[in-house]
Amino acid sequence: MLALAGLRIRTTSRDLALIFLVDVSASVAQDNRTEVLDFINREITNAAPRDYVGVVAFAREPSVELAPTRKEALGDWRISEISSNPPRDYTNIAAALRLATALVPEDASARFVVISDGNENLERSFEEAELLRASGIEVYTRAIGTTTERGQSRGEVAIRDLEVPEQLAEGEGFDLRVTIDTTRDTDATLRVYRNDSVVTERTVNIAASGENVFVLPQRVEQKGFYSFRAEVEAIGSDAFVQNNSREAFAIVEGQPKTLYLYGDARSSPGIARVLAEGNFAVDTRGPTATRLE
């Protein structure tokens, strides 16, 4: 009965899956690459013969640089370069942790070493790391620098999302939503462009903890195809300015048409006012109307 129920007894493995997660995003200084490779090779040298060794490179997305392989099968192999080239405009440590988890062989316990500057701007890795630790996977970090020419640490600010309704009616009001990620608390200028013309500009405060979502009321009076672009310009240093803008598009159609039929002696001023405020093109017909076109 236990076998039919799928019961399995799993003993603790002495073999280790040592997986390195290497940040290759644009915010990481390129002159640290040799130091990172030397560190990984030293750890490979110190690993036991039957330990697994793996490497995941990540930025916006993670990719497998070396699938977990027994050290004894690697022989004298050492990593000499990171050949993966994921999109470098964002840093998603949480996605890299999930990929590494999927790569762990069933007969090994796992240890992850995250090598990053910590400037994540997609998802939050803290919750993911806590879940891994609770499941018995060890997660370690090794910091690599993100520096300016003067050697000072740089922060990172990025627009994660720009939300605009895909279809709108002529003259309809709507809310444009901008979500901004940052690794440091700072003030910034947020601009919204409609067809390359500035329609909104305001100073905002963005915080490293929590979500920074800004709702900006908009209205488009004429029908047509519109592009919207949000840009953020932070006070102080910003490691990678290419992710400081995002675009969205909307199609604005003609006014919605409404037929208002009333059976009283006269139409309701309240209903007429609500329809007008909603920018409806209203065809009002009373009880004497005999035909609808």
Image (cartoon, helix red, strand yellow):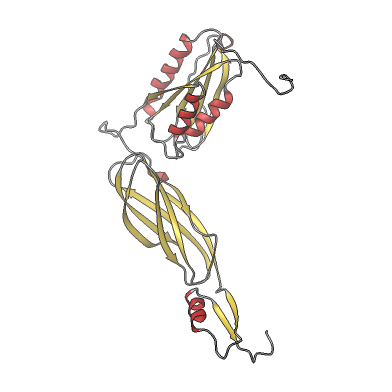
In percent of width and height, residue 241 lies at 38, 44
> Quadrant location of the C terminus?
bottom right
- In the drawing, does residue 9 fall left or right of residue 109? right
- In the drawing, does residue 273 fall left or right of residue 282? left
Q: Is residue 73 above or below residue 59?
A: above
Q: Is residue 263 above or below residue 14?
A: below
Counting the numbered discs, the total is: 0
Give the image quarter of residue 155.
top left
Is residue 140 among the parts visible in the rendering?
yes
**What residue appears at the point 56 percent right and 73 percent down from the top-left corner?**
254
Residue lying at the far left in this picture: please name it: 150
In percent of width and height, residue 170 lies at 52, 71
**What residue appears at the point 29 percent right and 45 percent down from the top-left corner?**
186
**What residue appears at the point 36 percent right and 50 percent down from the top-left corner?**
232
> Closest to the observer: 124 or 226?
124
- In the drawing, does residue 13 fall left or right of residue 177? right
> Closest to the observer: 267 or 58?
267
In percent of width and height, residue 114 lies at 44, 25
> Quadrant location of the N terminus?
top right
Give the image quarter of residue 287.
bottom right
Is residue 82 among the parts visible in the rendering?
no
In percent of width and height, residue 88 lies at 46, 37
